[in-house]
Each structure stands twice: as structure tokens, then as C-alpha cells.
Image (cartoon, helix red, strand yellow):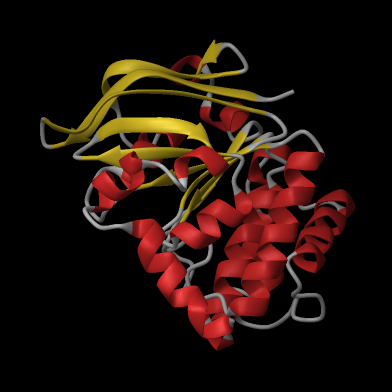
Amino acid sequence: MAELRIEKLSCGYGGADIVKNVSLTVKGGETVAIAGPNGCGKTTLLRAVCGLIPTTVGGVFIDGSAAADIPPKERAKKIAMLSQTGAGGDYFGYTVMNTVLMGRYSRQKGSVFSETSREDIAAAERCIAEVGLGGLEDRSITELSGGQLQRVFLARAFAQEPEILLLDEPANHLDIKSQSELSGILKRFTDSGGAVLGVFHDISFAAAVSDRILLMKDGEAVSCGRTEDIVGSKELSEVFDTDVSAYMKKILKIWE
């Protein structure tokens, strides 16, 4: 099974560390959520894990090998990331199919489109169907809603056939039904042996989809444990500087 190990990692921008000395192991078959207040370093940590920014101290290991030593194209076969905004060029009017096919690059011998095979097309079609966009393969992504775009980017990540999936606010723009469907998609991925590490703004959604939660504050790991232990912990309220449990129970009263 897949294994992602983050070891005493520090990283940031402009010579200043935003994330400081964070360690975490995520194994195949589980989803680990990263939660904490805005600006605490959650997305920065994901970007370092994915290799988008360098680490100043510590390292990232994928299946026991240092991620920095794995060639980018080979690393893309192991790990994929869904960011909050996609990537450059996503809004130039590509179709859903062509956007998802970008995720097949690491599986191809040449460039993204020059050697697209029947296998690539079939894989893209499966991923598009998996995220509930079947029938929209030829639609320009400029015509899609924010929630549909998020699904396209998720399908593109799945098209890489990764063992490890990094998610940065995956429920962004998704309605309630779509959030429920996303929960099922992630469960099927982990049931097949995949590992998920995700940043979640909505603590309720994080609790619903995760096996463990890593709490962060001021760039540091405050606590990490089973979801059922974290949601009722004093550390959760300390991290968010509010009584999270009381607030959630107050909201839920409207449904009683």
C-alpha cells in the first residue's frame, strides 16, 4: 500500500518558514484531514509535499523514497494534487476531456496530446464518469459552474492514477449533494488502497470524510489523532479560539 511520510518539515516563502517542524505519516486506506485557522500553513504544507515549493528543513518520502530524488514524471505517477484554483491555462477554453487528459501526461511517452492513446481516452472517460460529469466530455470548461470545474480538476488528478491524493479545499463550490458524492468518491479511492491528505475549511466535512485529523496553528502541528478523538478535544477549540463543539451543536439544533 501507498505511504506518504512527512518528516520534520519546515518550508515557506522568501526565506521565512511558514510551516515549522511538521511530521506526519499517511498510509494507504486512510484519509487524513488538515484543519486549522486561516493562514496557519495548511496549503503551504501541501504545496511542499507536492514539490511545488522547496523545503528548508526535513523531507517528504513516498513509499520510502525521498520525493526530491524521484523524477517529476515518475513522482506524478505516485502523487496528484487538487488545488483550490486548478493550474495555469485551465480557463483557456479547453474541453472537459482535454483538461482531464492532461492528467495522463505521466503515463504517456511524449507530450500531453501528441501520443494520446485509446487507453488514455478510456481512462479519462472513466474518471469523468467517476466525478459525475459523464456526457460533458466535449463541453468547454469556460461554460461550467464552479462546482463542475472542481469536479473536472478532481477527474484530472484521478487520471494520473496516483497512489496518494492531495486535496486543497476539495469541497469548494460544491453543493450538499456534490459534497456527499465527493465523500463516496474518496471512500472508494481509499478502499482501493489509496491514501488521501486533504486541507478542509469545513470542520464538519473534514470529520465526515477523515480517519484522522492533524490540527495546525501558527505553522506548527498541535495535535494529530483519530477523528472521533479530535472533534471533542480541547485542542480543537484552542486551535480555533472558540468552543467548536458547542458551536456545532448549536447549529445542529435547527434540524431537530
Task: Tell how many labels.
Answer: 0
Which residue is at 30% across, 28% downward? 54
Q: Where is residue 102, by image quadrant?
A: bottom right
User: From the viewer's perspective, is 147 left or right of 23?
Assistant: right
User: From the viewer's perspective, is 200 left or right of 218?
Assistant: right
Q: Is residue 189 above or below residue 144?
A: above
Q: Is residue 21 above or below residue 123?
A: above
* Residue closest to the eye, 6 or 126: 6
- Residue 60 rendering spot, x and y as whole percentages: 44, 21
- Residue 44 rendering spot, x and y as whole percentages: 31, 42
Which residue is at 50% across, 61% downward? 204
Q: Where is residue 48, by image quadrant?
A: top left
* Residue closest to the eye, 213 or 181: 213
Which residue is at 84% across, 60% downward? 126
Residue furthest toward the left?
A: 15
Q: Is residue 54 above or below residue 213?
A: above
User: From the viewer's perspective, is 38 left or right of 59?
Assistant: left
- Residue 28 rendering spot, x and y as whole percentages: 69, 29
Is residue 109 visible from the viewing direction of this image?
Answer: no
Is residue 216 visible from the viewing direction of this image?
Answer: yes
Q: Quadrant of the C terminus?
A: bottom right
* Residue closest to the eye, 18 or 139: 18
Q: Quadrant of the N terminus?
A: top right
- Residue 80 rendering spot, x and y as whole percentages: 58, 42
Q: Where is residue 182, by image quadrant?
A: bottom right
Which residue is at 49% across, 31% downward? 225
